[in-house]
Image (spheres, coloured by chain):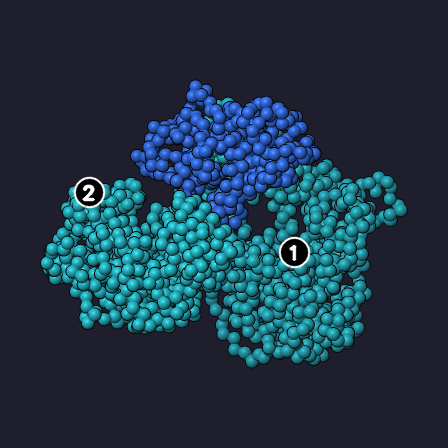
Amino acid sequence: MISMQPKSFEQVLEEVKGKRILVANRGIPARRICRSITEMFNAKAVMTATDVDKTSPASSGANELLMLGADPRAYLDLDRVIREAKASGIVAIHPGWGFGSEDDSFPAKCKKAGIIFIGPPQEPMRTLGNKVAVRKLAQEQGVPVVPGSEGAVSIPEAREIAKEIGFPVMLKAEGGGGGRGIYEVYKEEDLENAFSKASALAQASFGNPRLYVEKLLTSVRHIEIQVVADMYGNVFCFDERDCSVQRNHQKLIEITPSPWPNYTTELRAQLKEYSRKLVSAVGYYSLATVEFLVDAEGVPYLIEVNTRLQVEHGITECRYGIDLVEEQIAIAFGAELRLTEEKNKPYQWAFQCRINCEDPQKDFEPNSGRITRYVSPGGQGIRIDSCIGDGYRFPSNYDSAASLLIAYGNSWNKVVALMKRALREYMIGGLKTTIPFHCKIIDHPKFVEANYDTNFVRQNYAELMDYSDRESNSFRLTRLVAEISALGYNKYVQLGEYRGREDKRVGRFELAEPPKVSTWFEPRIVRGMDRDTILDTLRSDREAGIIHMTDTTTRDITQSNSGNRFRMAEDAIIGPNLDKCGFFSLENGGGAHFHVAMLANMTYPFTEAAEWNKFAPQTLKQVLIRSTNVLGYKPQPKNVMRMTGEMINEHYDVIRCFDFLNHIENMRPFAEVALHSNKNIFEPAISLSWAKGFDVARYVNVTDQIVKMCADVAGVSEKQAQKMFILGLKDMAGVCPPRFMRELIGAISQKYPELVIHSHRHYTDGLFVPTMGAAAEAGAHIVDVAVGAAVRWYGQGEVLSTAAYIEDEIGLKTHLDKDMIRATNFKLKQIMPYYDRYTAPYFQGIDHDVVRHGMPGGATSSSQEGALKQGYIKLLPYMLKFLEGTRKLVRYHDVTPGSQITWNTAFLGVTGAYKRGGEREVRRLLNILDIMNLCKEEDLTPLEREARLDLYRDSNDAFRNLLLGKFGKLPLGFPEDWIYQSAFGKGWKTAIAERTEESPLTTLQDVDLTAEMEALKARLHRQPSDEEFVMYLNHPGDAITTIEFCEKYGNINNLPVDVWFEGLIKGEVLHFQGKCNKPHRMRILDISEPDENGMAVVRYELDSEIMSHQVKVAEPDSGSKDATEMADPTNDYHVGSPSNGDLWVTHVRPGDKVKAGEELFNISIMKQEKAVVATVDATVRRVVKSGNYTEDKKMVPVVEGELIVELGPAAGVCPTCKLEVPGEDSNFCPNCGQKM
Amino acid sequence: MLPPGIFLWESGLEGLCEPTGLDDLTAISPIWKDELERCGAWSESVETDSGRFLKANLKNETTIVIVGKCSSTMEVARYLVESDMLPKWGAVIAVEQSSGRGQLRRPWVSSPGNLHVSAVLPEGPSKGDWAKQYGGLVSLLCGHLIASGVKSLGAEVQIKWPNDLLHAERKVGGMLIEERAGVDILGLGINLVESPPDSKMREDRSVEAGVLRTNPPVPGPLALWRALVSHGKSLYVVLLGELKPSQFVSALSCHLAWMGRTILVNEREGSTYQAEIIGISPEGGLIVRHTEGEEVLFSGSITPQ
């Protein structure tokens, strides 16, 4: 059939020059082939393009486009392609891969049109390309094939053949292909069942139930031979490509030569021989790939022949230093094959990763969308064939291949290293790609060893999926800065819109360093000393008149005074100085800080603690924990307590633990953890109130219980035990006067002379300094203080003034480096303005009345601020009065969470009375409270007994749980029965019967840690760290918010405080450190006005790239008619459409009362009818859209999530406090502040 | 719960379905007479809070409740589901309906001897690929089960998107799925003996009505339903377990009516345009191509040109 004289390659070059060659393809193959057409042949490269593709990066490689119009599938319309090609003077067509490349009518159609097809001729293509035909050919040629049936079989035939070839076998759908429609059968007895299933499946999938049987090779490698042949019978076989890393029979990575240790030169020669035979047998020319499976023993089986250029051809080109497309074109034009065994020797290793726009962690779900960032790797040994670029909108119409990344070099190890590096350099932003997944594969030791089979991905799936796909730290952080800058405030600190873009700012934070402190100072106690040495030092120092101090600047004081918001960035500024001041310890964690570190500072609390120990390595670190509540607000089960305790012990030296009821048993799990380490110091603390009944004798008794519990836990005598821990005294409200502390400490030290005492109090009553003086004088070893610039009125007192008082007035000594304290203070003076401006509470003054109302520390300001914000400031004096009175009736300590319970009870009681009868009713309520405190039960009138039931009628669940003993044993026993009657109403007797004095630890079930871990894993799509798990156990919702925030934005502590609170303005430059101390520079170029959707665009420079980021700064323009009101999915009263569809009937009207389960409206979704029902009892407030199809024959289109019916409380009841809400227009529940 | 088996709701329930007996039904239609006879003896009877049910001796792997005259099988099935009596795949077959309904409560008029059934579908998958897609595809899924079941009985039916069944270019049946409180109930009507004459059809109908003829002919509605549910139940498991929604959608196209044909699309606003049917989207919408490009329909109806 070939009558042509063989041409030389040079002749073809001459012939083709300037001619028009069409690539009937798109994307990577089209670009790749156009390159060869233009490079060597100097021909005109024409590329087909549909509308979607006409401006794609790939199309830039062509000299001209042949437009195929709007239909994305037009590439398959071969007749049209050929017609248009003919009309525009095309001399040859290259089909690429995919689309028409395997359609054997293509060469025939081209031939008919007088166009050269750059590929094989029709007949041999049909034979080699057909699975059944090629199998037959192979058997004729002595090429081994996978044993199996010839064609489709019945069940009895299948049984017969399976017996012959042996199990396991595969049932393959005749209509299947590409790895689809394969059913594996391992045992004879399963055959029948599997056959009917597979047949049904094949019928369902391919419309053809016929199956054939093939031996299932369980451990194989996929090895293929690239062949090139000319029209004159010359054939050249290249070394193998190993494509064994696959997922569901889809190739992910291809390597040449095979790195498999069992691969031999004999096998290579054999595979080449087989390949040559097949190609020669049918007179095939052009490129072909002969694919084999090779079992563990090295036995090959032919599977199929691909009659086209393949995706992985590039690695063969790299191995040989040739251009396969060039050869293919030349052959199509009649050139004689110019490759020979002598001239073309392989000399490189090469390795390709297919980079696809898919999310491996979501089962390789393809994604489309705009590529917001594109930085391609380069340098020595790297080749990229891609079809994407920066700003390209990756279409959803085609496959997800984005780029082919090849590394080539002179050894396997070299190409692995190159690929690792290249993947690291490769940045594709805006959508998910397989890059991180490839990184995981290449990092896998088994991959590098290369001793695996085609099950590699499946068998290591969990491991390979365990990664987090994140952009670089610097990039993520600038996204956050762009967001804060566009809004003008930082929404993540959850302080509302505390400033706007136009507001006056505090200004840039540029730290001025304090003058150098040259010092002789030697601390008495440092980290690394063991517990007993430290406690001995404290005792001997106290003997010598030396009082030690604990600094609370970065924890308790900023908790009370600055909304607890000191970030680690600021800690890191002052921490190194604090470390050298000579403090006994630095309280730097625990309490509310643990929660807020996550919630508002977006830091992992234990990572923070570990950092602290790096930048302040010398001084002991101290943490505060709330007995059973650990780091939260409600009792935790023992196993969570212990697990958290262990992590606390790892990072903190002094563990201060308190219980607001002084129920000492509640501390036991922590005592167990802390006392069993000789590095950690356990500091159980007594919660102090100053009130009737809470006298010295009582607290000495609590001390006895503590000593006893510690002795029990440590397994030593009580005498021994008192030397093993520190006793904390915790006056959280700041109420105990000097004389009381003197008396109390005196009594304790008399009874326990070896006990080290650590006194803690707040400043609220204004008597901090003399009280700490009295404590020191009476025998305390350590007192808590903070550094001057941070001191306000609700936290601790100031260090230098307290030291001065103790030294000058009392005549004792301290051991502090005061110059270092001054240097620390200088830094702090520069930091505090930001916290004062943006986070400090409203109420900052002394409140000596604390001795009456007992509201502790930060709660004093936050609760009073709450009353102000909710419009009840005029009731505040009554609330404080209520507090004063109620503290005498229900007795516990004014410490978290008791203080919150007391406050809420007072708030609810007073506002409740106010709503019932104005200030007059409030006064009546307080009057009865007074009477209850003054009169004896027997002196009460029946009217008064009735009236007192109003006192706690508005109390909440926390108060009721307290009365039930759910937090622990009340220190002075249960209150009187009438209080139960008031709080519980009808059920009061049951409440009394059910109350308990047992520690909640005895009843709380352990959490199923494995199940919780699985839940978190599922949520994060990866293995959580130990710290993340502990965060999650303590505060599940907030932990997830924080983890997700950190994944999204990175470490915010790399931002200076001004940028964190204020962002940047246009033109401002931010220098910040990224990971590994790499400096970065960000400058905002422009922040646009919000568009109709409320989105502003921030354009900025990051280092040398210009970026833009859209930020939602306002609500969408409600005037625009496209705006659709969406249902708030967290609000039960918002009933939205369950999906896109047509609303055809609405059953309710505004004002209707509905019961839970009642149908509100019905949506037709592709003519299925979905009833949407109320989930709660409610009143219909609004019907946003309504339909009545049966009457007006109109369907109302609705979108998923669109608000259809808005409900309100049934009879106006607050969902939280269950009280009636007077007007339907209230935005907040006047009782408890719940948003309505 | 009623156990697997074939039941006759003898007592009926006021306002839902009329009391009936073997003799009554036999008198209504000769086809039903034969159907009931094929069930063997009706010796057992079951008393429940909702009245008395007769049970046939013939074994059956799902629950089937036969009722006499009722307003609509949808309402009877819904009642039985809410009374915890009808398990999944359980079905109510009415001999006669006084106000049978199609979608949007359109009346569905049909004679005894035709199939009118409402069946409880299993709960959709809550995990995996199907979890999100199931809601959009359930109607087509049922269509596929029915079409493939009918095929095994030797007839071709095609699904006219989204819920009509065509046989020889005539509408022989329709489906309806009503979801409430998480339970999907499939309503299915198939003409076996009689179809409404062309003059009685809705004015905006898209095709003429017809009767399903299988080869060999099915003896009656009960036999047809038994064959469909037995085939459908196992195929349902295979489809959901083995195919991804996208694969299902491509598998479905072999049963889709008018594939590749140009049809008229009637949108809800009353606008009508020509378009070619290309396939089904992964969400279950109908993909059509018209002069301005492709579109995915989620509502509206289609008629042949």
Which of marks 2 and 1 precedes in the sequence? 2
Give a yes or no on whether discs 1 and 2 share a subunit. Answer: yes
Q: Quadrant of residue A721?
A: bottom right
Dot 1 surroundings within 10 Å: few (below 14), some, or many (20 or more)? some
In the image, what residue type sits under mark 1? Tyr
Residue hosting label 2 = A83
Find chain B in the image and tell me its colour.
blue
Residue hosting label 1 = A633
Q: Give the CA distance from mark 1 to mark 2.
A: 76 Å
Dot in front, 1 or 2: 2
Q: Residue at x 37, y 72 (%)?
A: A262
* Image coordinates for residue B158, horizontal then vertical, percent: 41, 35
A682 horizontally vs A375: left or right: right
Relative vertical location of residue A1147 with respect to residue A848 in this rendering, above or below: above
- The chain that appears cyan in the image is A
In the image, A848 versus A1022, the foreground residue is: A1022
In the image, A398 versus A714, the foreground residue is: A398
* Image coordinates for residue A1142, horizontal then vertical, percent: 47, 33
